[in-house]
Image (cartoon, grey):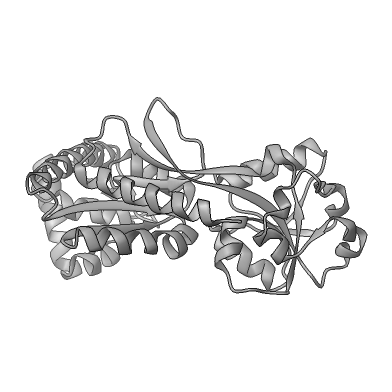
Amino acid sequence: MFSSMKYVYEVYKEHSFSKAAQNLYISQPSLSNKIKKVEAKVGAALFERNTIPLRLTDCGEKYIECAKQIMEIEHSFADYLYNANKLKTGRITIGGSQFFISFILPSILEVFKQKYPQVDIVISEASSVALEEQLFNGSLDLAVDSNALSSDIYERFLCREERLVLAVPASHKVNSLVSAYQLTLQDILENRHCSEDRNPVPMKFFVEEPFILLGPGNDSRKRADQLFADQNMTPKILVQPEQQFTAYILANNGMGATIVSDALLRCMAPSDKLVYYKLPDNFSQQSLYFYYKHNRYVTPTMHRFLEVAQSLLADDAAKTP
């Protein structure tokens, strides 16, 4: 009954027969027939077909739970076989934010692929919440995130240290009230926002400012909520994207203030549309980690990737002024 689990899993993942059929490169009637055959063997329906979006039945939830376990076992065995070939072939799945995938990962992959050209690399771009879910269910070998994941479940390796700063559209009137605290992009690039001589900006001045904050579950959003709570302030949240890169773009277009990392600003094209402010050290110091599950078989492929990544990131950190 699990020989066709990939079809059931794809429908579950997409919440749609039509989308799942497209992903599997089969017709929707053919997919429906395959699901019905599985349900006939099981003796119960796996999906509630009269709901939008499509939902699992109780039996369907148990089927998917078992299917995930089978898939993780298959994945682990496949990793073992790959490693027997000493990285002449192999596979690694890596998840991260849009910023990490777009600006940090490419340089790591370039070096890694030069050393191990036949290793297959699968990349997943997702929010912090989605990354942890994928890491937990075995869809990812490694996830890169600033959220503090449970040490009882996950092992972690430091990727890089970052500082969060407040970014405000230069055209907004609030800047005239806090001009003494203002930082330019060049100040950020030269690490002046890390200096003890610089005071963090009082957030009370931004009580009427519209904010672009990441959605709940993201590390910078948790920090922002705590920052505002400490100052007895309720921010006016305009929009809640899932990616820091998106928040930066919206702020750069004048929509509102946001909180971004100095690492992101170092990667973006220079812009005079934003001004920046230091935030309290206990709030702004952020660590980005590579995570994997304790009970997951750590393949030589994963070890080699982490070695390459940590070496390159250490070199980058040494070059930062």
Q: Nearer the viewer, residue 31 or 139?
A: 139
Instruction: Say which residue appears at 29% left-offset and 45% top-offset.
Output: 141
Give the image quarter of residue 173: bottom right
In the rendered view, does 215 fall on the left or right side of 292?
right
Instruction: Say which residue appears at 26% left-offset and 56% top-offset.
Output: 11
Instruction: Say which residue appears at 81% left-offset and 73% top-offset.
Output: 171
Q: Determine the residue located farthest toward the top in the rendered image.
A: 152
In the rendered view, does 131 fall on the left or right side of 178?
left
Q: How many numbered marks does the figure carry?
A: 0
Image location (x, y in percent) of residue 5: 15, 48
Q: Determine the residue located farthest toward the right in the rendered image.
A: 177
In the rendered view, does 286 fall on the left or right side of 86?
right
- Reply above or below: 66 against 180: above
Give the image quarter of residue 245: bottom right
Which quadrant of the rendered structure holds the N terminus?
A: top left
Image location (x, y in percent) of residue 158: 45, 41
- Reply above or below: 131 against 23: above
Q: Is residue 123 visible?
A: yes
Image location (x, y in percent) of residue 15: 33, 56
Which quadrant of the rendered structure holds the C terminus?
A: bottom right
Instruction: Say which residue appears at 89% left-offset and 57% top-offset.
Output: 180
In the rendered view, does 32 fall on the left or right side of 150?
left
Give the image quarter of residue 79: top left
Q: Nearer the viewer, residue 309 or 311?
A: 311
Q: Is residue 238 visible?
A: no
Image location (x, y in percent) of residue 154: 38, 32
